[in-house]
Image (tube, rainbow, N blue to C red):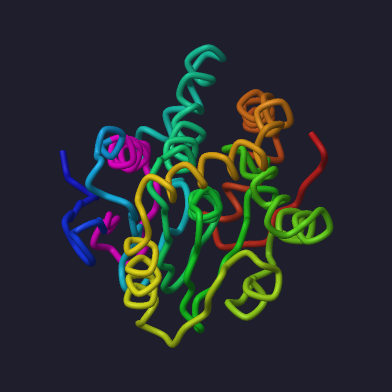
Amino acid sequence: MTDFVSIEKGLGPEGRIAVVRFDRGDGINALSPEALRQLTDAARSFEDDGDTSVVVLTGSAKAFSAGFDLKDAEGQSRKTMDIGSLRRHLKLGPRLSRAWQEMEQITIGAIEGFCIGGGVALAVALDFRVMSRDAHMRVPEIGLGMNMSWQSIPRMLHLIGPARTKQAVILADQRISAAEAHEWRLVEEVVDPGTAFDAAMIMAAKVAAQPPLSVAMTKLTVNRLAYALDDLASHMDVDQFALASMTEDHGEGVAAFLGRRKPRFTGR
């Protein structure tokens, strides 16, 4: 098994910063099921870590993530799964984003290149995001005949409001530039190309210099208040995704994407 994720701890002031790097070495950083598992395990590895106050999550120099890996063999096996197996398999994504959101440590995403689909879902589960000026985001799920899941809709709603969330999700072909992402409040800081990680580390150092227990308790309070109804609002995410994945439009969307052509949807 190939390791896609590495963790470095003991950085910054008092050694309270850790870096989680997701890099498949292909310049795309797609989220295969195995990558989802490794990133989830990385988040969970900090559960009993009282020495780390801040975790910076970064991708490669060319991409934060291209989203779910449509060409992965395990991912493609979903086509032949029964509904029970499919529902269990589809929980990998929500489990990942929930693990990162629920971390006691402050989390900061450093985004270079592109951040697409599942990459956006992961990014909005973090506390802060720093984005390179030439990077962009895109949410292509609806254009692939799917729905945006992983409990991402309520998280985006908190950040950018209803109209912008609809714009980002429904207009699947629309790229969201770094400037737009900042204007919409999807990201907190936009920096020169190639410096997103350095800027995230500067932000992390400021957080790490604060009293760790007060920071952790404040994050917990804010999250509990902000996300109190999110589970209720998105409890059908997995089932909606499973249902959408069985439609003809989903098959057409994926085939068009892989064939580099414009899809023709029929509402079936």
40 inside magenta stretch: yes
Horizontal and vertical percent for residue 249?
A: 71, 40
Residue 132 in magenta stretch: no
Q: Residue at x 38, y 77 (%)?
A: 199
Residue 160 versus residue 127: which sits nearer the camera?
127
179 sits to left or right of 36: right
141 w.r.t. 37: above or below: below
Q: Residue 194 location in percent, x, y?
A: 35, 82
Position of residue 225 relative to residue 66, above or below, is: above
Task: Please give the name of the residue rendered at 46% of the width and 47% of the height, measured from the top-left corner.
Answer: 68
Q: Is residue 94 left or right of residue 99?
A: right
Left or right, 200 with reference to 185: left
Q: In which quadrant of the rendered image does the C terminus lie?
A: top right
Q: Quadrant of residue 197?
A: bottom left
Q: Is 141 situated left or right of 165 in this image?
A: left
Q: Is residue 146 visible?
A: no
Q: Position of residue 231 (x, y in %)?
A: 65, 28
In terms of depth relative to the viewer, which is nearer, 141 or 101?
101
Which residue shows up at 67% across the image and 32% down it?
A: 228
Q: Which residues are magenta?
A: 19-44
Quadrant in which the N terminus appears: top left
